[in-house]
């Protein structure tokens, strides 16, 4: 990579970060010019680049033709959940992709089928939405099976939209197999492109064809960069997807009474009180993840990865059910990941007075360690009190981002220790010499001491810090660093 390319790439990243904070573009250019002393026209061009809407390449086909395997091959990493059974992918999932310096969004979809049983109609509805938003379609056909009625039905869907189509014949592992795909010409979609998603055969040539066929920019606004990321987590079937659908005012996620419907994380920009948030719907994590088999295990890993890239976690609990050990484990997962936390009690409008009193006692006993987390009681199905999420999200993010000046922190510690000295242990009393905040998002503090500090004492300090400075919705990490004695 040349020096100019390196500068361009770094400036694109930097300007992109600034522009997501609603800063005027001219101010960004002036600031970059000050820092780097580069030509204004060059900077204008760089600042504009991240704002282009990336083309959307949609992968469609009937169930179990290898769509998710091909998606993983094209993006160069194992993101989509794959298993050798039909119907694993259910929602439309977006992945960032790049080839030869050209960026695009690759959209994986569930298998389209004419069957009307179970979840299939809802999955097919998501496929139709993806087709409507596509700038380029990759239609995948299983070369070993040949054409089916469902393949021909998918072609009818495609022809309703005037969008370029690449017909991909998957599972072509050699030259002999290539000779057997001639019948695919009958679909009227042009020459079939042979690949083997499992072994990677033809994937590089397919990527070249994709970037040469797709338009330079999408007609759909690319909004996934910028807004605060919020992960919807919880046990299976507590209403995560229903909440996302209510916020987006559309059927963005497949919803069913069958537990475990969501498999891959689903990103979507939602507007709450005229403000954008990037919500990530995730698979419900079951009690024993290690004992899960097949796609459920990989779905749980994707959920944890989604939590890692989020800034706030919305833990959804069902009000009508008792708070479980799994709910508490999910809270521990959030605090260990260092993410802000908001507790959401769904189906609150259906509770009678007795259950509400009982639930309040459960919260007092079982969730006492996260009293600092904002709480919202709502109904995802009807939308009752959904607008209150905005206040809770803002409070949690502000607490998660709070920083205390070192001088104020040490004054607080001095007054705290004077009023509450550390207990004497073994004839010695540990003292706190100095304190500083070593991080934020989440807030982390270091206490420099003369000896060991009791865990109960650090919890006491944390409680007083919350009383003084808030830290609403955020875990606090406190590290004790013992000063070593100087050698004579």
Image (cartoon, rainbow, N blue to C red):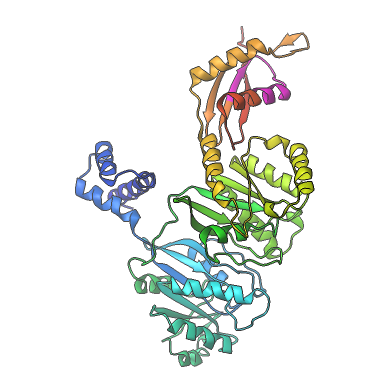
Is 360 above or below relative to 60? Answer: above
Is 117 above or below relative to 38? Answer: below
Q: Residue 199: horizontal and vertical position, in percent?
A: 56, 72
Between residue 80 and residue 340, name the one nearer to us.
340
Q: Looking at this rendering, what residue extends furthest in the front direction?
A: 353
Residue in view at x 64 percent, y 59 percent:
283
Residue in view at x 70 percent, y 19 percent:
452
Q: Is residue 14 left or right of residue 58?
A: left
- Magenta-span inclusion, residue 429: no
Q: Is residue 88 left or right of residue 153?
A: right
Q: Residue 181: horizontal and vertical position, in percent?
A: 51, 88
Q: Looking at this rendering, what residue extends furthest in the top direction?
A: 488
Between residue 265 and residue 392, name the one nearer to us.
392
Q: Residue 121: horizontal and vertical position, in percent?
A: 61, 77
- Magenta-span inclusion, residue 460: yes
Is 303 above or below relative to 441? Answer: below
Residue in view at x 44 percent, y 64 percent:
105
Do we see residue 78 in this rendering? no
Q: Which residues are magenta?
A: 446-461
């Amino acid at each position: 990579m040349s020096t100019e390319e390196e500068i361009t790439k770094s400036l694109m990243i930097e300007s992109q970060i600034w522009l997501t904070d609603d800063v005027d573009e001219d101010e960004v250019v002036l600031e970059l010019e000050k820092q780097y002393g580069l030509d204004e026209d060059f900077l204008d061009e760089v600042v504009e680049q991240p704002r282009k809407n990336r083309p959307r390449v949609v992968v469609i086909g009937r169930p179990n033709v290898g769509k998710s395997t091909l998606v993983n091959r094209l993006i160069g990493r194992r993101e989509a959940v794959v298993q050798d059974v039909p119907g694993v992918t259910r929602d439309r999932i977006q992945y960032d992709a790049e080839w030869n310096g050209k960026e695009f969004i690759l959209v994986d979809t569930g298998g389209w089928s004419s069957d009307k049983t179970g979840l299939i109609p809802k999955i097919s509805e998501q496929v139709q939405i993806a087709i409507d938003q596509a700038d380029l379609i990759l239609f995948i056909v299983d070369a070993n099976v040949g054409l089916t009625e469902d393949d021909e039905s998918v072609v009818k869907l495609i022809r309703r939209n005037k969008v370029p189509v690449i017909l991909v014949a998957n599972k072509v592992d050699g030259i002999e197999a290539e000779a057997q795909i001639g019948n695919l010409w009958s679909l009227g979609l042009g020459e079939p492109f042979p690949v083997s998603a499992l072994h990677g055969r033809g994937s590089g040539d397919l990527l070249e064809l994709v970037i040469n066929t797709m338009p330079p920019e999408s007609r759909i606004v690319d909004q996934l960069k910028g807004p605060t990321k919020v992960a919807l987590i919880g046990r299976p079937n507590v209403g995560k997807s229903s909440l996302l659908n209510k916020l987006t005012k559309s059927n963005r996620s497949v919803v069913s009474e069958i537990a475990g419907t969501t498999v891959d994380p689903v990103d979507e920009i939602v507007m709450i009180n005229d403000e954008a948030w990037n919500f990530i719907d995730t698979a419900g994590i079951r009690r024993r993840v290690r004992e899960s088999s097949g796609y459920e295990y990989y779905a749980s890993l994707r959920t944890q990865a989604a939590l890692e890239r989020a800034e706030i976690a919305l833990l959804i609990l069902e009000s009508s059910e008792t708070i479980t050990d799994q709910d508490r484990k999910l809270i521990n997962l959030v605090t260990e990941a260092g993410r802000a936390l908001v507790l959401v009690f769904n189906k609150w409008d259906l509770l009678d007075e007795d259950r509400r009193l009982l639930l309040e006692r459960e919260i007092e006993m079982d969730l006492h360690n996260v009293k600092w987390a904002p709480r919202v009681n709502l109904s995802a199905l009807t939308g009752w009190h959904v607008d209150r999420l905005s206040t809770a999200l803002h409070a949690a993010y502000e607490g998660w981002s709070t920083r205390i000046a070192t001088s104020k922190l040490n004054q607080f510690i001095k007054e705290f220790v004077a009023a509450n000295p550390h207990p004497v242990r073994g004839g010695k009393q540990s003292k706190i010499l100095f304190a500083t905040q070593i991080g934020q998002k989440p807030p982390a503090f270091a206490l420099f001491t003369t000896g060991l500090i009791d865990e109960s004492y650090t919890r006491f300090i944390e409680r007083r810090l919350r009383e003084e400075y808030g830290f609403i919705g955020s875990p606090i990490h406190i590290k004790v660093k013992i000063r070593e004695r100087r050698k004579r």
